Amino acid sequence: MFTPYRTIQQVSIITYEIEEPMYQIVSAQFLAENIKKIEIEAPRIAKKRKAGQFVMIRVGETGERIPLTIAGSDPEKGTITIIVQGMGKSTRELNRKEAGDTIHDIVGPLGTPSHIENFGTAVSIGGGVGTAIAYPTAVALKEAGNNVITINGARSKDLVILEKEMAAVSDEAYITTDDGSYGFHGFVTQKLQELIDSGKKIDLVLAIGPIPMMRAVAEVTRPYNIKTVVSLNPIMVDGTGMCGGCRVTVNNETKFACVDGPEFDAHQVDFKNLMDRNKLYLPEEKHSTDAFAHKCHMHKQA
Ligand code: NAD
Ligand code: FES
C-alpha cells in the first residue's frame, strides 16, 4: 500500500539549517531578461551546502515556499547564490529585490547532493535557466577529475546564461541556440547526438532544464546505455519529506524529489507523470500571478 507521508523516524535523519529570519541580499543583477542572479547572506548554509542541493525560500512572511537550487556559495564570505527565473508570483517578487533588501526565510541545504566521482568523460547539459543548476555539478565533476564537456542551450543568444562560468570548468564547451543566433543552431539534444556520433566515449550525462528537454536527452542516451542523470523540479511545499507534494515516479516506485532527489536516473523517470502533476495548480498560479501584476501596476500609477 502506498503511504504518501514519511514517518518521523525517516524525517529525523535530515539535517538542515533554519537561518534566523531576514536574510540580507548582498548583490543582485539580471543575467538575461527575467533571469536574476542573487547573492544572499546565509553563512551556515554556505558552509554546509554541496552541489545539487537546494534551499526553500519564503520571500515575505505570508508567501509560499519556493525551492531554488544553490548555484554557488562562498563559505568565507558567508553567502549563497541563487539564479531565479521570474515565472510566477513569488519568483517575480524575488526578482524585484535589489542589494540591501531582505528575504524573510531560507531553509537548507536540502536534498541529496549530486553523486560525484571520476566517471571519465561527463557531459553536463543546461537548458535555459537549468544551466544555473547544471553549473555547480559541472564544477564538482571537474574537481573530481572528470573530462567535462558542457552544452549550454537557450532559445536565442540573449537568453544564454553563465557562458564564461561553464567554459571555465569545461574541457570542451558548446553553446546551442534554437534560432541559430549564437553557437550551434539547434537543440542541446542535437549537439549531444553529434558528440555521440563522432565516436566520443561518454560515461555520464547530466541534463537539467525544461521537462521536455530532459525527457528528450534520456531518449538520446538510452540506446547507447549511457548513464544519464536529471534533476527534477516537481511542486514542493516543505522540502523535507513531510507533505508528499513532490512525489515522482522512478522505476515504477514513488519517490520524494526533495529528499530522495532531486537527481534521478533519467532512464527510469516517468516524465509524463511529472508533467501532469506540475500542471495541477496552473489556474491558481495564474490567478496569483495576475493579481501580483495588477498590484504592481497599481503601485506604479500611485
Ligand atoms: P527553454 O524552453 O528556453 O529551453 C532551453 C533549451 O532546452 C532549449 O534551448 C533547447 O536546447 C532545450 N529544449 C527545450 N525543449 C526541448 C525539447 N523538446 N527537446 C530537446 N531539447 C529541448 O528553457 P527555459 O525557458 O529557460 O526553461 C524554463 C523551464 O525549465 C521551466 O518550465 C522551468 O520549470 C524549468 N526548469 C527546470 C529546472 C530543473 O530543475 N529541472 C530548473 C529550472 C527550470
Ligand atoms: Fe513535501 Fe517533498 S515531501 S516537498
Image (spheres, rainbow, N blue to C red):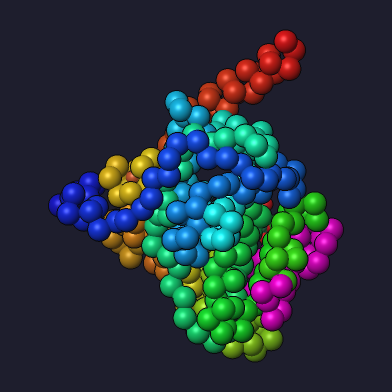
Q: Residue 32 or 181: which is nearer the viewer?
A: 32
Q: Is 177 one of the magenta-colored residues?
A: yes
Q: Is residue 229 left or right of residue 243?
A: right
**On screen, residue 255 above or below 170:** above
Q: Quadrant of residue 181?
A: bottom right
Q: Residue 128 or 268: which is nearer the viewer?
A: 128
Q: Is residue 24 left or right of residue 264?
A: right
Residue 272 appears in the picture as rendered: no
Provide residue 106's location: percent of width, then percent of height: 46, 43
Q: Residue at x 50, y 36 (%)?
A: 22
- Quarter of the image where ligand 1 sits: bottom right
The total number of labels drawn is 0
The residue furthest top is 302
Q: Residue at x 17, y 54 (%)?
A: 9
Q: Which residues are magenta?
A: 168-192
Q: Residue 73 or 35: which is nearer the viewer?
A: 73
**On screen, residue 91 above or below 70:** above
**On screen, residue 264 above or below 32:** below
Residue 182 appears in the picture as rendered: yes
Q: Is 200 one of the magenta-colored residues?
A: no
Q: Quadrant of the C terminus?
A: top right
Q: Residue 5 or 100: which is nearer the viewer?
A: 100
